[in-house]
Amino acid sequence: MLGPVILAASRSDKMRRFVSAAPGTKQVVGRFIAGETVEQVIPVVRETTARGLEVTLDVVGEDITTREQASAARDAYLELIEHLKGLDLGTRAEMSVKLSMFGQALDGGHELALANVRPVVEAAAAIGTTVTLDAEDHTTLDSMFAIHEELRKDFPQTGCVIQAYLFRTEEDARRLAASGSRVRIVKGAYKEPASVAYQDKAEIDKAYVRILKILMEGDGYPMIGSHDPRLIAVTQELARRAGRKLDEYEFQMLYGIRGDEHVRLAAEGHRMRVYTAYGTDWYGYFMRRLAEKPANLLFFVRSMITKN
Ligand SMILES: Cc1cc2nc3c(=O)[nH]c(=O)nc-3n(C[C@H](O)[C@H](O)[C@H](O)COP(=O)(O)OP(=O)(O)OC[C@H]3O[C@@H](n4cnc5c(N)ncnc54)[C@H](O)[C@@H]3O)c2cc1C
């Protein structure tokens, strides 16, 4: 019940101001956000990769309103890539981007987002790594998939994300699997209407398994973005049945969530990538993490009360 309310609040400027100014917020945000600056996140990248894990780095931010902000988002990623250069991690450190942060929702936004994301993908390729396009709300996806296809002409390793809760996704999965793409499959984190998405958790999980099967049996590289123990077990079984080796798919989990599981899966020989978000514009990302687990909200409210 609480999830949809929190997701609605994630789009409210009033709530943004309230939550950002609340005492105790920083401490709770710190569980999910690895730092505010590139200088703070680089030691996290070093430490995570030293433990045998991999990372995908997300400079937080979305729903920007000016072209200047879109350029600044591009520059933030280029600055990150400059810092990664010295670490020589190759694909062990890749990047995740939200096209709304690159201007997708502005006038002429499709072309603008493509123009802003291309230099990031080029710079990533120059240091031996790649970029994955995150999936945002359903109205943005046709544009995201078209940009993904365009980027793959020059950079075939560019990945994208599909969301199990959307009715359209099985078809998207078939197309992407046939084209040999890197694809992250997730349950989906936005507030979507019943006309386009399953609302029931059990239905979403069933769809997730159907899509996973398509990806495992296809020609692409599946990236399983989930903390759900049942889906992790199903993944292992489907990969075995499809005859995939351990390096022919990977698990991905979020920084700050089920850290023991990151280490356990890596110790079993799996590729495990930690989605590591950093930056100052953390509000939307943080609210989606609260919506996924109401206990997080309780913890957050308690920390505000204790600080008062
Ligand atoms: C690497 C990665 C990238 C993602 N990228 C996108 C994207 O591009 N677009 C998109 O819409 N969504 C994205 N998501 C979010 C995703 O859609 C889900 O909202 C999120 O992963 C929770 O679903 P779950 O599969 O972990 O299963 P759930 O059933 O939600 O959770 C399973 C268990 O994981 C733990 N858990 C899950 N979430 C939390 C949390 N917030 N706090 C504490 N514990 C938690 C709990 O123990 C829970 O019981 C991404 C998720 C991951 C892991």
Image (tube, rainbow, N blue to C red):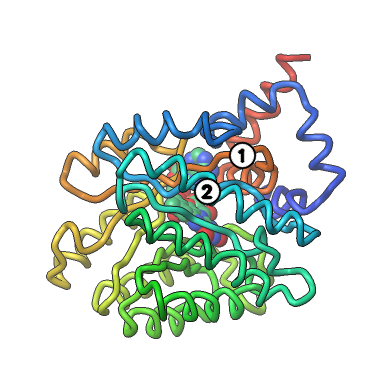
Q: In the displayed structure, does residue 221 sit left or right of residue 204?
A: left
Q: Quadrant of residue 279?
A: top right
Amino acid carrying mark 2 in the image: Asp
Q: Where is residue 278 in the image (x, y as percent from the top left)?
A: 56, 39
Residues at marks 2 and 1 touching, judged by CB atoms closer than 8 Å: no
Quarter occupied by residue 259 = top left
Residue bearing mark 1: 279
Q: Is residue 80 visible?
A: yes
CA distance separating discs 2 and 1: 8 Å
**Label 2 element class:** strand
Q: Position of residue 107 (x, y in %)?
A: 79, 74
* Residue 173 vertical placement versus 273 (above, below): below
- In the rendered structure, the answer to whether residue 165 lies left or right of residue 212 reads right
Q: Identify which residue is drawn at 75% across, 57% down.
A: 64
* Residue at x-position 39% and y-position 37%: 258
Q: Residue placed at 36% from the left, 53% from the top? A: 127
Nearest the camera: 148 or 112?
112
> 126 or 57: nearer the eye?
126
Position of residue 125 relative to residue 30, above or below, is: below
Instruction: Identify the residue at image location x=53%, y=51%.
Output: 78
Q: In the image, is the residue at mark 2 within 8 Å of ligand 1 by its beta carbon?
A: no
Q: Mark 2 points at which residue?
A: 58
